[in-house]
Image (cartoon, rainbow, N blue to C red):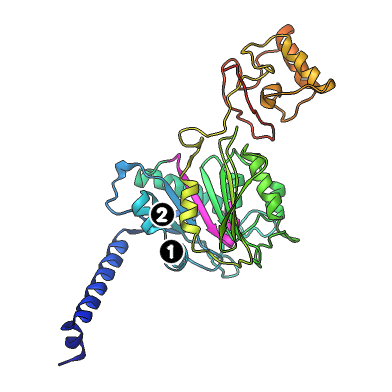
Amino acid sequence: MTSFESIRTTPFGLLFLLLCSVLFLTSTLHAQQIVNETIVINGATRTYLVYTPVNFDPAENLPVLFAHHGGGGTGASFLQFEADFRSLADSERFLAVYPDAAIDADGCRCWNTEGPYDNGIDDIEFADAMIDAMVSNYSADANRMYACGFSLGGSLMWDYGCYLGDRFAAFAVVAANMWEWTYSACSPAGPTSLLHILGTDDFYAPYDGNTYSIATSLQNDYWANINGASNVPTETILGGGISRFDWAPESGCHAVQHFRTQNGGHVWPSFANQSIWEFVSQFDLNGVIGGCSGETLFRRGDVNGDGELNISDPVNILIYLFDNGTLSCENATDSNDDGSINLADAIQVLGYLFNGSGPLPAPFSTCGDDPTPDTLECASYDGC
């Protein structure tokens, strides 16, 4: 009897063969759901993989998660060895896309970020074109585009946040901080929710910053401000040296979340896949899907929250500025929407009341949330 026949005729052998069959079938099914796509950007052919969840139907209008590999990698290797989102895509119903970086002049398959080391490859336009293609070819939901990246792919995410915030509803960065030049040149099109994962011993992205990249604390505060999130995070100890910090969505309806791995190195951690999807899937381009907790609607210029704009409102501003007055809604008091409270706000309301200077910035006439990211808050407002 051959060794194969011996295996096949024992209970253990039968179990082994059954397990192999199941694994083979699962692998085959996954392979059948991966589509190799190409798109031409500035005359260059770019490639990416699309994983369609089991029983995919274009009528589902699914969200998309773009997962970007590290420097020197490929989309296929990233899927196979680090960030395999296929099971989550099946259960949570989303399309997983694995783009390939282009090969630069030095022979590196490396993502290009804006700044002094720009290699001339337009990865911003590549992302923009992939979004359009996913909407056109897979009937994907244009309001629920998400992106994540590792290492150099994570560095690219900061460019997405700075230049494609009107296309991506949320992004996630693993093992990368903002470059100094990205930070200084960043001009977001709008708030974009952010998740960040970093180990304190990461050589590529030193936790407290260095000559090239900014400190994690500065970065998180910057995006919390852009997103109109809470000023102070809540901390949750998760065990295993991992702590999670949450800047909750407020007036901007977008959030910031940071995972710190004590003594963690330059790796894609095991908890990343689940944590990324749990975070980004809460948002569409407008912010928290279904409305954000902590969001207080208000009417610009109605300082005392009585539902009307009259002389008492600039008087309340003056009392606050010069007589130790208090405010319940800083956003309503910021009459000119410049992100600060000063004498110009009282003048803005007086101009509207007595000089025909025109309506105040939104939200005005009707209640709404603050469309402009700033550090001001609205603890309570009774005029809506």
Amino acid type at mark 1: Leu
Secondary structure state at the residue bearing disc 1: helix
Task: Report if residue 315 is visible in the image.
Answer: yes
Task: Report if residue 44 is visible in the image.
Answer: no
Q: Position of residue 341 (x, y in %)?
A: 76, 26
Q: Position of residue 68 (x, y in %)?
A: 50, 58
Left or right, 72 with reference to 133: right
Residue bounds of the magenta highlight: 142-157
Q: Position of residue 3 (x, y in %)?
A: 21, 90
In the picture, the disc for residue 79 is 1
Q: Are marks 1 and 2 in contact (CB under 8 Å)?
A: yes
In the picture, the disc for residue 221 is none
Name the image quarter holding residue 318.
Answer: top right
Q: Nearer the viewer, residue 47 or 291?
A: 291
Residue extending furthest toward the bottom: 1
**Does residue 346 lie above or below 138 as drawn?**
above
Name the image quarter holding residue 39.
Answer: bottom left
Residue under circle 2?
96
Amino acid type at mark 2: Ala
Tell me the crowding category of disc 1: few under 14, some 14 to 19, or many 20 or more residues within 10 angstroms, Cα based.
many
Among numbered discs 1 and 2, the one appearing first in the sequence? 1
Secondary structure state at the residue bearing disc 2: strand
Seen at 57% across and 65% down, the residue is 104
Seen at 67% across and 40% down, the residue is 231
Residue extending furthest toward the top: 354
Q: Nearer the viewer, residue 218 or 123?
A: 218
Q: Position of residue 24 (x, y in %)?
A: 27, 70
